């Protein structure tokens, strides 16, 4: 109570240090995760203080909302991206993520029926109750049978959607793990129905125009089991290192979007684009139409590989973007014209010659303790960075676009250790390209200007 008027983040840091809560959590099951979540809570508190009245009461209400499921907040990551660690997660939590190598485990598992109670309820069909007859035997009504069949159909559809998510998380290699023979109702049965996995011998290969696979039936030797002679030794020094005191005010570094940073650096502001998180007035109908069109153009270039398909996969593009038949009727012909014109560009030729292409590549670039977050439209390894622009070309925005690509180049250097040779601004409507060279003497001034802008932003906040 004596410190109740202290800033929220400082109050929580004091609470953590004086209670020793991290050490207590580390001694429990999944202790490392629990202690990491406490560190994350401190970072969330610091961020929360910048958005809402920074009182302990309002923060507790926010945490309660997360706990009750009214808001979502994921677990704290135990390892940074690219740290060589294995990430274990449910398929639901993997939505929207991508990894170089993905293992989908236990594909031979059969989902058990969920509803075994006498009560059957479906919001479309209604409610019914199974009852016992004079002999004590449970009798199900026709409605109960219909509800059970409807639930089975819905669960099968949800299972198929979940399988699709699991199979599309891998960027380079996908390893599907299952039983030697498929079981009825399992994902392995679905796979076997299409690829005849069960009858293929060890080492057999499968070929497709977009992928190749190999059947592995010989399991590696199991690792030696831990001795049961006694408890495992405890490394006290390692535990002490994990519960180092939390430095006061040591909140996680703040983050800024590429759009907000470019606005702070100067130049004409970008038109509204999907994903912008800076404060902006409500979009006009014309802006919303431009955003819809921009979303579809970027989704088209993300899902379409001109090396393998003469035209984009329209069904998937409109479905994934969340737009229906009306948007397709309005825009597909226009998008098809953009795709056709793109085939004759230098940017397209760079894709054809590439061994590896990353699309919609997210990054975090550390600039003076502030994370710059953004997404590179398309990165050709050993080649250029491509950034797609819709609408008319504006000469007064050229400097802004150059800064954007130079910051992308700095992020690519952080990811790969190599500066890309150049960037290409692809104006998809005008069929124009602008090449931006990437040299150290080009990138350094852009980073210096970004640092100055971030310093000014932090001083105002």
Image: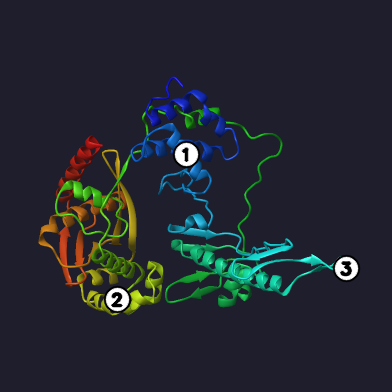
Q: Which mark is residue 331?
A: 2
Question: Which image quadrant is residue 251 in?
Answer: top left
Q: Which mark is residue 134?
A: 3
Q: CA distance from mark 2 to mark 3?
A: 65 Å
Query: Going by the picture, which residue comes out furthest to the left?
Result: 395
Q: Residue at x 40, y 48 (%)?
A: 81
Label 3 Cα neighbours within 10 Å, binned few <14 / some 14-19 / many ≥20: few
Residue carrying label 1? 61
Residue 300 x %, y %: 32, 70
Please tell me which of labels 2 and 1 falls first in the chain. 1
Asked if the residue at tag 1 contacts the one at tag 3, i.e. Cβ–Cβ closer than 8 Å, the answer is no
Label 2 Cα neighbours within 10 Å, binned few <14 / some 14-19 / many ≥20: some
Asked if the residue at tag 3 contacts the one at tag 2, i.e. Cβ–Cβ closer than 8 Å, the answer is no
Q: How is the image coloured?
A: rainbow
Kindly tell me whether residue 308 is visible in this rendering: no
Mark 2 against mark 3, which lies toward the viewer? 3
Foreground of the two, 244 or 116: 116
Mark 3 against mark 1, which lies toward the viewer? 3
Q: Residue at x 59, y 31 (%)?
A: 234
């Amino acid at each position: 109570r004596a410190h109740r008027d202290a800033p929220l983040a400082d109050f929580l840091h004091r609470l953590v240090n004086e209670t020793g809560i991290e050490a207590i959590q580390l001694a429990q099951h999944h202790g490392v995760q629990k202690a990491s979540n406490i560190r994350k809570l401190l970072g969330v508190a610091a961020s929360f203080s910048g958005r809402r009245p920074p009182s302990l009461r309002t923060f507790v209400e926010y945490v309660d909302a997360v706990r009750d499921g009214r808001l979502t907040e994921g677990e704290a990551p135990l390892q940074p991206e690219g740290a060589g660690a294995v990430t274990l997660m449910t398929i639901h939590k993997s939505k929207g993520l991508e990894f170089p190598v993905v293992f989908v485990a236990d594909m031979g598992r059969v989902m058990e029926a969920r509803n075994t109670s006498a009560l059957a309820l479906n919001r479309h069909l209604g409610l019914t109750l199974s009852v016992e007859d004079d002999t004590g035997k449970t009798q199900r009504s026709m409605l109960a049978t219909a509800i059970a069949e409807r639930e089975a159909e819905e669960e099968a559809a949800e299972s198929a959607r979940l399988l699709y998510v699991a199979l599309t998380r891998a960027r380079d290699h996908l390893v599907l793990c299952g039983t030697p023979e498929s079981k009825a109702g399992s994902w392995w049965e679905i796979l076997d129905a299409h690829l005849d996995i069960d009858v293929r011998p060890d080492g057999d290969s499968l070929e497709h125009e977009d992928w190749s696979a190999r059947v592995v039936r010989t399991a590696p030797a199991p690792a030696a089991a831990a001795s049961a002679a006694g408890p495992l030794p405890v490394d006290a020094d390692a535990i002490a290192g994990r519960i180092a005191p939390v430095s006061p005010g040591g909140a996680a570094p703040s983050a800024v979007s590429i759009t907000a940073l470019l606005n702070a650096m100067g130049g004409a502001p970008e038109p509204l684009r999907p994903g912008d998180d800076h404060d902006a007035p409500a979009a006009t109908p014309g802006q919303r139409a431009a955003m819809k069109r921009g979303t579809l153009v970027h989704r088209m270039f993300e899902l379409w590989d001109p090396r393998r398909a003469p035209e984009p996969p329209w069904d998937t593009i409109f479905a994934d973007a969340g737009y229906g038949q009306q948007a397709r009727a309005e825009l597909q012909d226009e998008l098809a014209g953009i795709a056709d014109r793109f085939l004759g560009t230098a940017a397209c030729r760079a894709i054809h010659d590439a061994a590896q292409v990353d699309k919609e590549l997210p990054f975090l670039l550390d600039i003076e303790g502030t994370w710059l977050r953004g997404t590179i439209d398309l990165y050709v390894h050993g080649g250029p960075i491509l950034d797609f622009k819709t609408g008319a070309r504006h000469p007064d925005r050229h400097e802004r676009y150059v800064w954007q690509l130079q910051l992308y180049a700095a992020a690519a250097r952080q990811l790969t250790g190599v500066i890309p040779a150049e960037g290409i601004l692809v104006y998809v409507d005008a069929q124009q390209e602008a090449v931006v060279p990437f040299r150290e003497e080009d990138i350094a001034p852009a980073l210096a200007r970004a640092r100055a802008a971030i310093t000014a932003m932090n001083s105002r906040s």
